[in-house]
Image (cartoon, rainbow, N blue to C red):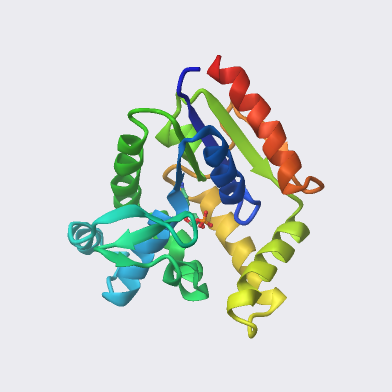
Amino acid sequence: MRPIIITLDGYSSCGKSTLARQLANQLNYVFIDSGAMYRAITLYFLRQHIDWNNAARVKKALSGITLYFQYNPITGQSDMFLNDENTEALIRDMLVSEHVSEVAAIKEVREFAVAQQQKMGEKKGIVMDGRDIGTTVFPNAELKIFVTADPAIRVERRFKELYERNPNITIEEVKNNLEMRDYIDSNREFSPLRQAADAIVLDNSNLTREEQLAIALEWAKEKMI
Ligand code: DC
């Protein structure tokens, strides 16, 4: 079977990363959560008090950032490293979530992240999830999936996930954050979130994880022949 590139795009918290990780496990492919890269850059900008409306400051700051993923044998997943620091837990915080869409909308930030993502896919055998993976990062990917889910279900899922780490979080906060991110991600000037013309839609509102994995695996296998 030939190695292929699989892209998963869609709105915030519709289960893209979970599905992408499972697919990669089943196929023995590399899994890349591209959102983690934008989150790590945002964390760096917040910590260093970078004025991200200033393109020159942004460029200079990016030159001080090294990003890589490293396998964590305890969780069995890849953690996001920022300048040799494991930032996996920090980048999922609400503070980063509140600013990541603004940072991800910056042209220089996108160029920086996209160049690295494209390099990761040079040998194929990769599953990457994000917002512009099928449109900008890998426009020639063999399989493009556009994942959707009912907005109320997405809020519920995200709330459950965050509540485990922060019991003070409210469902309103989560809902507002998702709506704001979806709006900014879909309306930004550079590489907005769009369904690629040749993407297949997977609505997982009423599917279990096992069911959606089975569907995606079927599609992948058809493309690998
Ligand atoms: O997938 P996520 O929710 O962790 O992504 C965090 C943010 O990063 C999201 O609000 C939009 C941005 N992002 C992006 O602009 N392009 C990508 N390929 C992935 C994420």
Residue sticking out furthest to the top: 225
Q: Which residue is found at the position 64% from the left and 62% from the top?
A: 179
Q: Relative to the observer, which residue lies in front, 169 or 60?
A: 169
Along the horizontal axis of the image, is 35 left or right of 20?
left
Q: Position of residue 95 (x, y in %)?
A: 47, 75
Q: Relative to the observer, which residue lies in front, 61 or 55?
A: 61
Residue 175: tell me if it is visible: no
Q: Relative to the observer, which residue lies in front, 101 or 89?
A: 89
Q: Relative to the observer, which residue lies in front, 129 or 135?
A: 129
Along the horizontal axis of the image, is 5 left or right of 40?
right
Residue sticking out furthest to the front: 73
Q: Give the quarter of the image for residue 47.
A: bottom left
Q: Which residue is found at the position 59% from the left and 56% from the top?
A: 183
100 w.r.t. 106: above or below? below
Q: Position of residue 66 (x, y in %)?
A: 24, 56
Residue sticking out furthest to the bottom: 168
The quarter of the rendered structure image containing the C terminus is top right
Q: Position of residue 146 (x, y in %)?
A: 62, 37
Residue 1: tell me if it is visible: yes
58 w.r.t. 69: above or below? below
Q: Give the quarter of the image for residue 136.
A: top left
88 w.r.t. 23: above or below? below
Count of numbered circles on the image: 0
Q: Which residue is found at the position 65% from the left and 64% from the top?
A: 158
Q: Position of residue 194 (x, y in %)?
A: 56, 39
